[in-house]
Amino acid sequence: MNHNETKYSHRAAGLFLTALCLLLWSGAFTPAAATIRFAQPGGLASGVCAAWGSACDLQSAIALAGAGDEIWVKAGTYRPTSGADRTVSFVLKSGVAIYGGFSGSEAARSERPASGNVTTLSGDIGVPGNTSDNSWHVVVANGVNSSAVLDRFTISGGTADGAGVNSDGGGFYIVNAAPTLTNLVITGNSAALTGGGIYNLGSSPILTNLLISNNQAWFEGGGIYSLRSSPVLTNVTLTNN
């Protein structure tokens, strides 16, 4: 390539970058809208979960969701599995926001009722009411960042009475993570060792508007147990743990 060709090549590249910057500044390029997945009790186990009329079960919606997606969850009770495998939990993902409290007809998240519509993530699998066969952890956040969001849920029935990691964190088991947890009631969970309601290890979860009550751990941290962690608490009530 001779000198003139190099000069024109650089000029063309410069014009392209200038045009691209102008397009971005003018709004010609806009971020893609979030894909919304819909979940309801007894929902479909497959599909794209693209509307209330074809809503999936919550685990299927989580499995399908990718970064930037939202999951809208209709009021009701959801369990990690319909079977008896105590190792199965609801696992949060970076970039995926899960919102409970919907009636099942909303077209915009702003239409979600401000109260009511209790949406429960329950570890009461196996025999109903028998805590000895409940999920070890109802919700797991492992390595996720603050874009992993859980909002407007009740978390209950986690029974971490197993060995090793399954003896901590009945409600939440949070490891090396910083999930955003908002508007939650965490109640009726237990652990054989630590963190009946929430177990934090090497984590900095963002906790806002939480009621953590009536959880227990047989060693330490009935409500919250944190080791090498820096949780950020805003308007969090701990009572009767």
Image: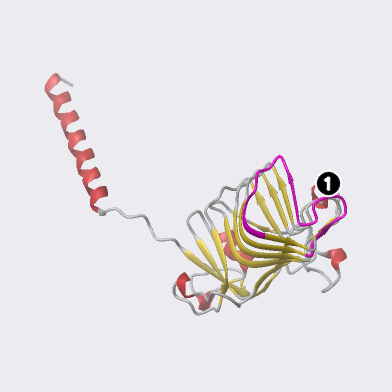
Specify the quadrant that holds the C terminus.
bottom right
For the N terminus, which image quadrant? top left
224 in the magenta segment: yes
Q: Is residue 146 left or right of residue 199?
A: left
Q: Vertically, is 74 above or below 167?
A: below
Location of residue 10 in the rendering, given as x and y in whole percent from the top left corner: 19, 29
Membership of 138 in magenta stretch: no
Q: Magenta span covers which residues?
A: 214-236
Labels in figure, total: 1
Q: Identify the element where label 1 is drawn.
A: helix
Q: Residue at x 79, y 58 (%)?
A: 136
Instruction: Please name the amino acid that badge 1 sits on.
Output: Gly
Determine the residue located farthest toward the left in the rendered image.
4
Residue 16 x, y percent position in the rendering? 21, 39
Q: Position of residue 179 (x, y in %)?
A: 60, 52
Which of these two is toward me, 84 or 30?
30
The residue tagged 1 is: 164
Residue 218 picture quarter: bottom right
Which residue is found at the position 53% from the left and 76% from the top?
Answer: 113
Where is residue 172, by image quadrant? bottom right
> Is residue 166 found left or right of 33 in the rendered image?
right
x 14%, y 29%: residue: 8
